[in-house]
Amino acid sequence: MKYIKMLGLAAVAAMALTAFTAASASATTLEVKGEKQNGSVTLSSSLKAGTSAILKDTFGFSSNTCKASSVGGSTTTTTGTTVTGPAEGLSFGECARSVTVHTGGVLHVSHITGTTDGTVTSSEAKVTTGSPFGTLTCETGAGKHLGTLTGSAAGHATLVINAQLTCSGISSKWEAEYTVTSPTGLGVVA
């Protein structure tokens, strides 16, 4: 279960902070302080102060809690139907059980119409975590919904992870809240 939680957290953090894909009927891009970006955007994020990343099976038998986690990276596409980038530097620390990030995968952010927010998806992420059942492997495959990136024109954007994952065949839920520490004023626009 801990592995599942960590995989979910890794996938969400990586996807939300380092790779964004925005999909809409029109071109989507990231903005910083209200200005659309036409180049790569470098992002960094960490768990919101005073919170933890939690991975638990949906039966309530096992969970893993990490008090530290971060992710960052740079976008590889800047505008179009999608904006994407690899989730780099994904890490988990101060965990109840061991967590290993094999790959952070790629993050995708889809613009939510009428807002500066985006839906975050992760692909190709792989994390393992210890559990009472042994080591569990969590993977996001071709794409797994992680949560929502809420933009902030003047402050710090937030990424709320609320993902349903399957880790080594066990249904699990990953919950976490990240603060995008850089850049300030990040948003997703069409």
Image: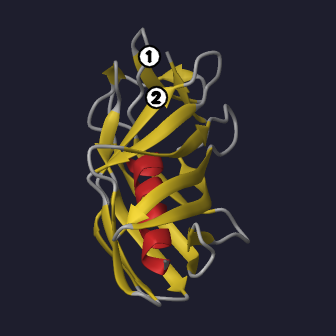
Q: Amino acid at mark 1?
A: Ser
Of callouts 2 and 1, the N-terminal one:
1
Between the C-alphas of marks 2 and 1, the distance is: 7 Å
Q: Position of residue 3 (x, y in %)?
A: 42, 76
Q: Amino acid at mark 2?
A: Ser
User: Dividing the picture into quarters, in which one does residue 137 lie?
Assistant: bottom left
* Total count of labels: 2
- Mark 1 and mark 2 in contact (Cβ < 8 Å)? yes
User: Dividing the picture into quarters, in which one does residue 53 lie?
Assistant: bottom right
Which residue is located at x 52 percent, y 35 percent? 119
Reading the image, the residue beneath label 2 is 110
Looking at the image, which is closer to me, 113 or 61? 61
Which residue is located at x 42 percent, y 9 percent? 25
Reading the image, the residue beneath label 1 is 24
Looking at the image, which is closer to me, 108 or 57? 57
User: Dividing the picture into quarters, in which one does residue 116 lie?
Assistant: top right
